[in-house]
Image (cartoon, rainbow, N blue to C red):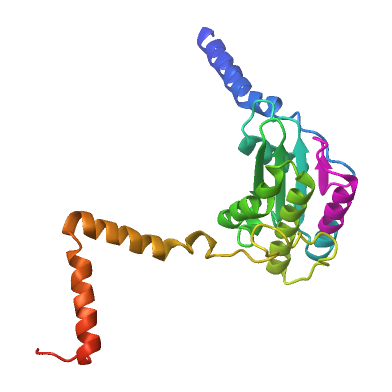
Amino acid sequence: MIKLNRIFALVLIFLFVVTLPAFSQSNYPSPTEAFFVNDYASVLSESTEEKIYLLGKQLEEKTGAQIVLVTIDSLGGQSIEEYSIGLAMEWGIGQKDKDNGILMLYSNAERMLRIEVGYGLEGAVPDIKAARIRRDYIAPYTRNDDFDQGFLNGYTALVTEVAKEYGVEIDGNIGLPRTDDPWGETSEYPESRNSFNFIPMLFIFFIIFDGVFFRFKIISTILKLIFWNSFFGGGGRG
């Protein structure tokens, strides 16, 4: 009998430990009537909220996918990953059978932003593209507290990518990003921006390496070969 009581007590403790995180993380805000834009941190203007709502509504009507922007005052001790996953599950963002929802979550106290993409849209917005949207379209504005333009740019970029995935067109006049964004582009992500200085830098490092370790013997040999080929037309003894 004592053994059974101990087993029963252990089971209760186990259930308490397992369910405790669920209770502690369930204090999420309720979605607003607009649903697609929920500015609990009060960092957006009404006009920006309206533009985001119209974009989100249009995307949902044409594809069924949902992109939701949420700003909060604080994460309340949770990591932004835990909070975003919990909130997305609590609200049921996207179609349940397709998991085609995206959550843009910003916490004002921690100055942190996360883009949580459902499995159904990972092909349209993989991690590397989500990171570029944060870096190139949102961060240049939010670091200067221009949340209106930053979040509108980011939201529009996400809508554009999802629309491409479904093969539909979205009215760009609603929330088109400003033409003076960091790269001067609105819908394409420049692949070569991070590597456009790579070749000159590699050449400089090669010269330094050759000078330090080989006293420019490699470069001297290359120049001699170039001179020989250009002067004699590539001829010479075999």
Query: Is residue 180 among the parts visible in the rendering?
Result: yes
Relative side of 237 to 179, left or right: left
Quarter of the image containing the N terminus? top right
Q: Is residue 38 magenta?
A: yes
Q: Quadrant of residue 215?
A: bottom left
Q: Work out whether 198 lies above or below 19.
A: below
Q: Residue at x 69, y 63 (%)?
A: 161
Q: Work out whether 105 lies above or below 204.
A: above
Write the start and end of the magenta stretch as one range: 34-56
State the image coordinates of residue 58 (x, y, percent, origin top left). 84, 61
Q: Residue at x 46, y 62 (%)?
A: 197
In the foreground, 38 or 157: 157
Q: Residue furthest left?
A: 237
Q: Is residue 142 magenta?
A: no
Q: Residue at x 53, y 12 (%)?
A: 6
State the image coordinates of residue 32 (x, y, percent, origin top left). 87, 41
